[in-house]
């Protein structure tokens, strides 16, 4: 069994050697793109050979959760050194934990504020492709050492992704999505409420990336089916 750092270094070297494989994995993890599992495809074949990729219902998937989290951390860490949002989260991280409890509502609120400040001039295409990565970069220094997160594979797509955060045994669910109209948003709220029921949770969080010129950014609360949904719009 390789030590964690050795595994991380080994992955980094292989992805550097095969940038086309790196690009495929990045788009699967951060953008929710789907690829048919065709072993004749050079990228798929190389990913399978390294143990990074596997077949799931005819589609390409990261082979297991341990590799998935290593790849998430590896691909996001490449941008940490020059990322203002990572830096500000690292500097302010102590405010988010009180008495050993991660205060997710404050995490969402501050992400909104910092996102608006840092990415005010970014174009829509950049945000659409990188919004999930940006949020995870903000989250990483806050929970580092005491918590972890994973992406729910069933909801990872171009429109919606659910992140399950586990901080000292307490779970929080954050739904990340691209705004596609009010009706789609209402369906997302209902889906999150059902998901919270499955996890026996009363409160959940939504992060919406909205590109409408008339959008209203900030925080709001929705009560639905006995659940409290806290939505942040950027």
Image (cartoon, helix red, strand yellow):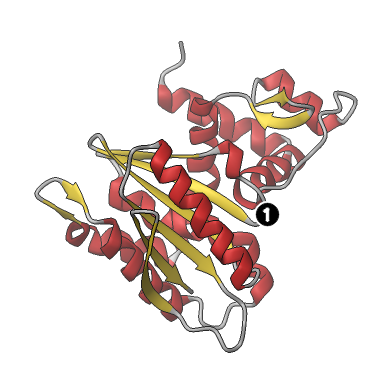
Q: Is residue 64 left or right of residue 85?
A: right
Where in the figure is residue 160, as x and y percent of width and height?
59, 54
Q: Which residue is mark 1?
A: 158
Q: Is 26 placed above or below 46 here?
A: below
Front-lying residue, 42 or 207: 207
Residue at the left extreme of this rendering: 99
Front-lying residue, 68 or 85: 68
Q: Is 171 placed above or below 218 here?
A: above
Residue at the front extreme of this rendering: 225
For numbered disc 1, what is the local secondary structure? loop
Q: Is residue 116 left or right of residue 214?
A: left
Where in the figure is residue 113, as x and y percent of width and height?
36, 76
The number of numbered badges drawn on the structure is 1
Q: Residues within 10 Å of mark 1 (few under 14, many from 20)?
A: some
Residue at the bottom extreme of this rendering: 214
Where in the figure is residue 141, as x and y percent of width and height?
32, 51
Residue 78 seen by the camera: no
Q: Is residue 130 left or right of residue 92?
A: right
Q: Residue at x 64, y 77 (%)?
A: 123
């Amino acid at each position: 069994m390789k030590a964690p750092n050795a595994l991380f270094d080994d992955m980094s070297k292989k992805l550097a050697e095969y940038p086309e494989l790196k690009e495929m994995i990045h788009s699967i993890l951060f953008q929710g793109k789907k690829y048919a599992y065709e072993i004749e495809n050079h990228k798929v074949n190389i990913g399978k050979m390294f143990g990074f990729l596997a077949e799931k219902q005819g589609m390409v998937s990261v082979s297991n959760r341990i590799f998935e989290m290593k790849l998430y951390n590896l691909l996001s860490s490449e941008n940490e050194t020059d990322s203002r949002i990572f830096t500000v989260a690292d500097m302010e991280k102590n405010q988010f934990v009180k008495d050993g409890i991660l205060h997710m509502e404050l995490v969402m609120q501050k992400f909104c504020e910092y996102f608006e400040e840092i990415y005010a001039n970014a174009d829509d295409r950049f945000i659409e492709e990188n919004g999930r990565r940006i949020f995870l970069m903000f989250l990483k220094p806050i929970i580092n050492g005491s918590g972890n997160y994973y992406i729910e594979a069933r909801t990872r797509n171009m429109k919606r992704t659910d992140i399950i955060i586990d901080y000292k045994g307490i779970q929080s669910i954050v739904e990340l999505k691209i705004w596609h109209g009010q009706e789609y948003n209402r369906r997302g709220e209902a889906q999150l409420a059902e998901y919270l029921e499955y996890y026996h949770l009363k409160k959940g969080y939504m992060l919406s990336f909205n590109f409408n010129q008339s959008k209203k950014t900030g925080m709001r609360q929705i009560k639905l089916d006995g659940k409290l949904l806290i939505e942040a719009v950027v």
